[in-house]
Amino acid sequence: MSAVLLLKLFLVPLLILGVTLAGRRWGPAVAGWLSAFPIVAGPILLTLALEQGAQFAAHAAHGTLLAVLAIMVFTLGYVWASARFQVPGSMACALAVYGVALAALQAVELDILACFALVIAALLLTPLLFAPPVAAAAPAKAGPGDLPWRMLAAAMLVLFVTYSASRLGARLSGFLAMFPVMSTVLVGFSHHRSGRAFAVALLRGMIYGYFAFATFCVLVSLLLQRQSIAFAFSVALACALVVQLLVKVLLALRQRNAAAAAPAMGK
């Protein structure tokens, strides 16, 4: 069995296993923050680079970055629909608006830096459009059939995108690398087992994680045009990790300031 096939079959499912266990240990905000790191799209783009070439993967990463906008539409669609529907209805609404957004993005032609700026603006705006939480998020509940389905869904997505790349082309492969497998699998199971508040908190945490994801995509797209695959992915991953940690620090500071301000407001 080749190293590339092993990457497809095992890396992403194992990463999803880690995120799931983190959510059960530290809560939905941490799980969402971790799951938005390029643990699905990153291995897909790396596999595309190894199998289709650096330039193909550079164009795919450009498409993946742009598709973050469709994920924001999916996120808002699920948050708003979940106030009225259970998991099946909420997921159907979210995937429907995601599909419409992805179709609309097919016609968008922006250079990579303009895409990056647009995505960052969307990441800053989207949390402001969330409905107020109705309850505190409950701890995640474990389920016997939970983990295998999450891991299987991730493996199937990686296999489908990478094996279809030669027919799909770089741009569409990049779009599909951003298919909301983490959102559908993690959020769907979490909503079912732990309630809407947990699922919404998970989605909010994902948004904060996408700052690192966007950094990863823009660097992969730019560096693959001039550097080796190993260098491009190593630098992009390192920079994404730095951004991920900085976002976590900023969120912790904001929560601390909010907690300190709450008693003063109550006086």
Image (cartoon, rainbow, N blue to C red):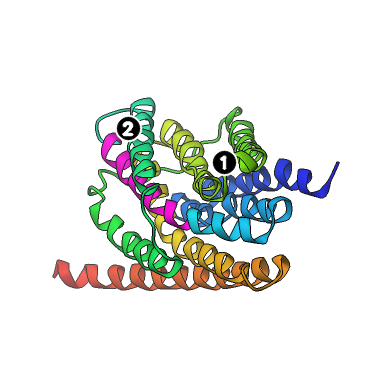
In the image, 82 versus 29, the foreground residue is: 82
Task: Judge left or right: residue 221 versus residue 68.
Answer: right
Amino acid at circle 1: Leu
Q: Is disc 1 placed on a helix, strand or loop?
A: helix
Q: Residue at x 73, y 50 (%)?
A: 51
Q: Is residue 238 magenta?
A: no
Q: Farthest residue in the right direction? A: 1
Q: Is disc 2 placed on a helix, strand or loop?
A: helix
In the image, 58 versus 152, the foreground residue is: 58
Up/down of 221 relative to 39, above or below: below
The quadrant in which the N terminus is found is top right
Q: Residue 45, which numbered label?
A: none
Q: Which residues are magenta?
A: 65-81
Q: Residue at x 22, y 49 (%)?
A: 132
Q: CA distance from mark 1 to mark 2?
A: 26 Å
Q: Residue at x 61, y 69 (%)?
A: 225
Q: Quadrant of residue 123?
A: bottom left
Q: Quadrant of residue 242?
A: bottom right
Mark 1 — residue? 168
On the image, the x and y values in percent for residue 94 come to 35, 36
In this rendering, which labeled residue sits more in front, label 1 or label 2? Answer: 1
Q: Quadrant of residue 84?
A: top left
Up/down of 157 relative to 21, above or below: above
Q: Is residue 75 magenta?
A: yes
On the image, the x and y values in percent for residue 230 come to 72, 67
In the image, 234 versus 106, the foreground residue is: 106
Task: Judge left or right: residue 227 versus residue 214.
Answer: right
Q: Residue at x 45, y 66 (%)?
A: 112
The quadrant in which the C terminus is found is bottom left
Q: Residue 93, which numbered label?
A: 2
